[in-house]
Image (tube, grey):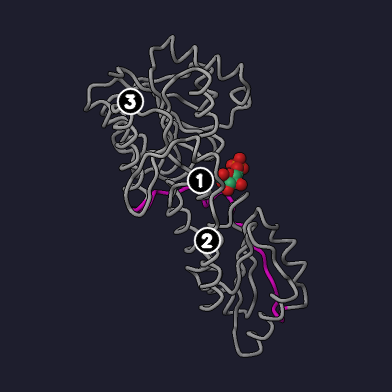
Amino acid sequence: MVKRIGILTSGGDSPGMNAAIRATVRTAVTDGMKVTGIKQGYAGLLDKDFIELEYNSVGGVMERGGTMLRSSRCEEFMTTDGRKKAGNILKEKEIEALVVIGGEGSLTGANLLMQETGVIVIGIPGTIDNDIAETDMCVGVDTCLNTCIDNIQRLKDTASSHERAFIVEVMGRNSGYVAAASGLATGAEAVIVPEIPVNYDKLSERIWSERKRGKINCIIVVAEGAASAYTVARHFEHKIGYETRITILGHIQRGGSPTAFDRVLASRMGYEAVKAIEDNEGGVMIALRAGKTARVKLAKVLAEKKKFDKKLIEILEVLS
Ligand code: F6P
């Protein structure tokens, strides 16, 4: 049986990472394992920035945003030498299994670490982008969406008062999920996502005709990976019949106390990560599929690109 596990958070943080750390630590300790907390992601692993985590070390963290272990993006770990060094450090510290909470880049690093050094790794998908294949949701997405809709709703208030259009830029380097879901949830007129090419002329015609039919505001949500809000505004200048303003929501989308959904999801995933280690099933990511947690091979997850659900946009266009 594995006696000691390590845990780290890596890449862009997401709300609920603390709940995942808490669940992993408490499940492992309850089942008789020791836990090493690794600070600052893979950079901390290479710097041996470790802390011993006990049952009580994770008290009062579930409701906190960010990650108590801190996070980073580490270039050295992207090299074979960096990962070899990491593998040796884990062996030296008698850490037999590693739980990695993070997005696609972090899980790719974890998978390579296992292939190259034999260390058992388990992934927990933690990213606001919801761009990881084989899981319906990632830890942090729901909180991010709630932050987006709270802010877009406020913009809608002032947009109506002044009969304006707002172009709202949300996060999502390669993924339009946050834009599409927050647009749908706020009754936005349109969303622009990296997965679907946009026809600005057609879109301006639609918004212009809705304006003529009496609409008094217009919200267009754009994912940062599709275009910048400034570019979108330039395309629409004088074409949609509204005075236009721009808002970039930025990193507020990554902060804040996690929602109930994220706390529950993270707790389930942290618990299942330890159970996978106990079952000797390394190299898997804990996923949420049709409401249930599942173990999916990391290699399979990383070989796929998450499919964008175009239905979200179809529905938005009917309802807006
Ligand atoms: O991957 C998560 C994410 O929040 C992306 O949506 C965004 O493009 C990126 O991280 C921002 O990264 P950073 O915090 O390094 O600016």
| 10 Å crowding of disc 1: few (<14), some (14-19), many (20+) | many
Between 156 and 297, which is closer to the camera in this rendering? 297
In the rendered view, tell whether residue 154 sits above or below residue 52: below
Location of residue 267 in the rendering, given as x and y in whole percent from the top left corner = 31, 42
Which residue lies under the disc numbered 3? 280
Between 123 and 281, which is closer to the camera in this rendering? 281
Q: Amino acid at mark 2?
A: Asp
Q: Amino acid at mark 1?
A: Ile
Which residue lies under the disc numbered 1? 132
Between 139 and 14, which is closer to the camera in this rendering? 139
Location of residue 42 in the rendering, given as x and y in whole percent from the top left corner = 52, 25
Label 3 to label 1, Cα distance in Å?
Answer: 24 Å
Residue 4: name its quadrant.
Answer: top left
Label for residue 224? Answer: none
Q: Which segment is the magenta one? A: 240-261
Residue 259 is covered by the magenta coloring: yes
Label 2 to label 3, Cα distance in Å?
Answer: 34 Å
Which residue lies under the disc numbered 2? 309
Name the secondary structure under disc 2.
loop
Q: Residue at x 47, y 44 (%)?
A: 14
Residue 21 left/right relative to 40: left
